Amino acid sequence: MKVSKQRKKSNLIAGLTGGLATLLIVVICTGVYLRFMKEEKKDISLEEYVHIDNLKKVVVTKEDIIMGDKITAEMLDVVYIEGEATEYALDLTDIIGKRSGGNILKGMPIVKNNLFEDIVVSDDLRNHEITYIELPSLLKKGDYIDIRIVFPDGEDYIVVSKKQVQRVEYSEEGTLFSTMWVNLQENERLHLSSAIVEAAAYETAKIYAISYVLPDLQEEAIVNYPVNTNVYELIINNPNIVDEAIKKLTIRGENTYVKGDEEDIIKYQYEE
């Protein structure tokens, strides 16, 4: 009896030892396998990993790009999308150094037909500083505006159409005393100068800017301001009259107009 019990005890110990050894081997093998698979995954391409054959590389913007900006590598990033991407520019070398044909918001893909080698600039284009018109309160760099004139009888005309704001600075006194910069050609400057002189001649006339909602989709407005012949001749004969008119508009805006200065600032008559 003692021998039989001893044998059973020995067999039980042997069985437990063998089971533990087997379990240890399984754990080691599993660990090695998982480590191997982890190493293997590092070499798997993105397409193989997600099992998508038509994954496409697309170039997107890291920041807002304004129309006419020259695109640099720092402005761009690369993402992958599923499906066709034929309308998008897929190669950085096809984009860097080109200019944008429109405003592109941060995170948007670059479209092929929205890129240009360069933009032709006319010889008479100048950056014009404007400090005497009323600006929209939310105006910012890159927005597009029309510059308009409104007369006391309610007649409202477009003086300059769809100009991009290059820079804007708001004053603490309000939008009427803020400053913006836009690029104007010579004929646009003459139109604006004429409007300034006319606005100064009417006590309640004003020049103001109004912005576009979707400039990429909206056509530019048609300029319909009728330049007055007599005003135009005054500007040709006395270029200082524009500065004098600007002073009058500024004083009017400040509501500190002193009676008596009116006759000294600007004097002219014209036929209706």
Image: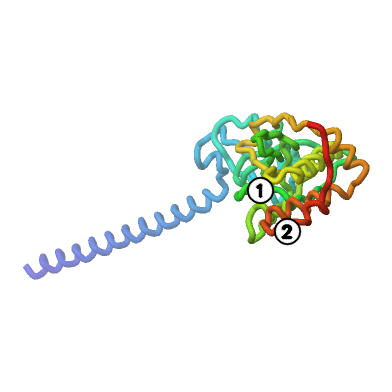
Which residue is pictured at 73% across the width and 58% down the height? 258
Name the residue furthest left.
1
Residue 18 coordinates in the image, percent (x, y): 28, 60
Q: Label 2, label 1: how many angstroms apart (C-alpha)?
A: 25 Å
Q: Is residue 10 above or below residue 241?
A: below
Horizontal side of residue 206 vs 228, given as left or right: left
Which residue is pictured at 19% across the width and 63% down the height? 11
What sort of colour scheme is used for the picture?
A: rainbow
Q: Counting other residues with Cα less than 10 Å from the Cα at mark 1, is it few (<14), some (14-19), or many (20 or more)?
A: many
Name the mark on residue 258.
2
Q: Quadrant of the N terminus?
A: bottom left
| Location of residue 67 (image quadrant) | top right
Q: Mark 1 = which residue?
A: 135
Q: Nearer the viewer, mark 2 or mark 1?
A: 2
Q: Is residue 220 above or below residue 265?
A: above
Which residue is pictured at 67% across the width and 59% down the height? 171
Residue 36 coordinates in the image, percent (x, y): 49, 53
Which residue is pictured at 49% across the width and 53% down the height? 38
Q: Quadrant of the C terminus?
A: top right
Res 156 visible: yes
Q: Nearer the viewer, residue 196 or 266?
A: 266
Name the mark on residue 45.
none
Q: Nearer the viewer, residue 202 or 23?
A: 202
Q: Nearer the viewer, residue 142 or 115?
A: 142
Residue 215 coordinates in the image, percent (x, y): 65, 36
| Location of residue 112 (image quadrant) | top right
Horizontal side of residue 151 vs 272, given as left or right: left
Report helix, strand or loop for mark 1: loop
Residue type for callout 1: Leu
Residue 196 coordinates in the image, percent (x, y): 78, 44
Residue type for callout 2: Val
